Image (cartoon, rainbow, N blue to C red):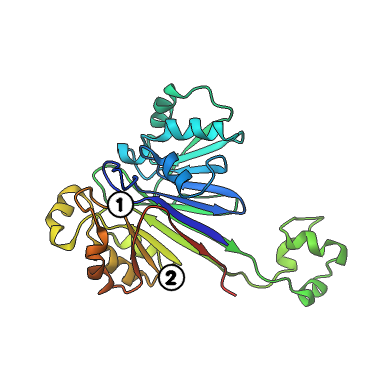
Amino acid sequence: MLDVCIPGTGGTVPKLERFLACCYMRYNGAGLLIDCGEGTQLAVKKAGFSLGKITTILLTHFHADHCSGLPGLLLSMGNEGHTDTLLICGPKGVDEVVRSLMHICQELPFRVETRVLGDFDSFERDGFSVTSFEVRHSCPCLGYDIRINRAGRFDTEKAKRNGVPVALWSRLQKGEEIDGYTKDMVLGESRRGIHVTYSTDTRPSDMISTMATEADLLICEGMFESEKLDRAKESSHMTVTEAAHLAEESGCRELWLTHFSPALPDPSVCIGEAKAIFPNTEAGVDGMTKVIRFDE
């Protein structure tokens, strides 16, 4: 199962009642964080998750409300006993941005590595399969497609047909490769895994709905009410109804709206606009959490 939380749901500046937009995912004890604006370490703690378990941070872009909280977060991680290497990924420039921010938090008990990602770059870490994709903002910006892949069931008859010694069955099922024997020799067809797509700070893009095709959850910005479409276009953001159309096109199971404008004190007042297009839409609130389980 995968724990998904949006500790913060605000855009531009933090407010007393709303932290800046970010997303925390936990799988098999490892934490993955998307974006880190000012106060993110407090938002994650308030939501009940561990900073010390974060192993990967994905930055969508380098506007302050998405990355300026890194120094405080890294120091807090060290205070919680984090010692493993931390990987921070983002668009071109992530190396320089992270290095600059770390000037004020140099004494860390763990190494920090950076990785530049572009359109359709993928990697796997701690059970998370991550694919980045470019979106349409006022600066280079990435969305992220996160999957937890699931192997097929153990197939006794297949193992026997392939002449796999019984003593190796358990180890092969766990993914080991032994003396030329592989997991494919003992497992059936892959089963549906878990799929979450995250995209903020963008105008609508076919790529968002494509990446979120049949996803368990699409987390997407709904910064403005539909009547503020002109403002959304000017600032390279999205309205709640535009996000709902993307969800409808993707065939995803659920939509969470996030990254709300500071001028929108109660996003729930315009949730009806989105639900009219995609009924399974929720207006995100700080700390909203969902446990996504594998389909049986």
Asked if 22 appears above or below 69 in the picture, the reply is: below
Q: In this rendering, which labeled residue sits more in front, label 1 or label 2?
A: 1
Look at the numbered disc 2 and give the secondary structure of its residue.
Answer: loop
Q: Position of residue 253 (x, y in %)?
A: 42, 71
Q: Secondary structure at mark 1?
A: loop
Q: Is residue 237 above or below residue 283?
A: above
Q: Is residue 181 visible?
A: no
For the point 28% across and 59% down, which residue is it? 205
Q: CA distance from mark 1 to mark 2?
A: 23 Å
Instruction: For the N terminus, give its image quadrant.
Output: bottom right
Q: Quadrant of the C terminus?
A: bottom right
For label 1, the residue is 259
Viewer-proximal residue, 152 or 293? Answer: 293
Disc 2 packing (10 Å; few <14; some 14–19; many ≥20)? some
Badge 2 amino acid: Glu
On the image, the x and y values in percent for residue 57 come to 47, 42
Q: Residue at x 46, y 53 (%)?
A: 131
Q: Using the rendered view, name the quadrant where residue 277 is placed.
A: bottom left
